Image (spheres, rainbow, N blue to C red):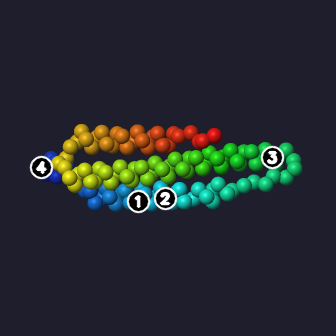
Amino acid sequence: MAPENNNKEVTVDTNALRASAILFDQWGDELLKSLPDLKRFKILPGEFPAATELKTIVDTHTTSLTTNTTNLGNALKDISLKLEVIAADYDKTEDDNLGDAERLDAMFNSVNDILNTEPAK
C-alpha cells in the first residue's frame, strides 16, 4: 500500500485504503446481520439431567458467541470508518507520519476495547 520510490519518499494509495474500508464494512455487516439467526437458536431439553445440562452449556456458548460476533462486527466497522478518515486526511494534507501513527494507534486501541467488551448481564 505504501511502497517506497527512488526518492525515498513514501506514497499512500488512498483508493486502496478506501477499497479496504469497504471490505471491512461489508465483513462487519455480514457478522452483525447473522445475529438474529444466532439469537434464535434454542435447545429444548427433555426431562432428564443430561438434557438440562446440555441446554445450559449451549445457552452459555450461544451468549458468548453472540457477544463475540457483535464485538467483532463492530470492530470491523470501526476499522472501516478509521481507514476512511485516514484516506480523507491523506487527500487533504501532506504526509504527516506522527498524525498517521497517532490515528492508527487510536484505531488499534478502539478495536481492542471493542473486542474485549464484556457481555451485558
Q: Nearer the viewer, mark 3 or mark 4?
A: 3
Q: Residue furthest right?
A: 47
| Disc 3: which residue | 52
Crowd tier of the residue under label 3, counting other residues whose Cα lies within 10 Å: few below 14, some 14–19, many 20 or above: some
Q: Residue furthest left?
A: 7
Q: Is residue 98 above or below residue 32?
A: above
Mark 4–mark 2 contact, CB under 8 Å? no
Q: Is residue 36 above or below residue 74?
A: below
Q: Position of residue 21 (x, y in %)?
A: 37, 56
- Dot 4 or dot 2: first in sequence order is 4
Q: Nearer the viewer, mark 4 or mark 2?
A: 2
- Dot 1 or dot 2: first in sequence order is 1
Which of the labelled discs sits on residue 23, or is there none?
A: 1
- Is residue 3 visible to us here? no
Q: Position of residue 69 (x, y in %)?
A: 55, 50
The CA span between labels 3 and 1 is: 41 Å
- Label 1, secondary structure: give it: helix
Taking depth in this image into account, of 26 and 120 the one nearest to the observer is 120
| Disc 2: which residue | 29
Which of the labelled discs sits on residue 7, or is there none?
A: 4
| Residue type (three-letter) at the residue carrying disc 3 | Thr
The CA span between labels 2 and 3 is: 34 Å
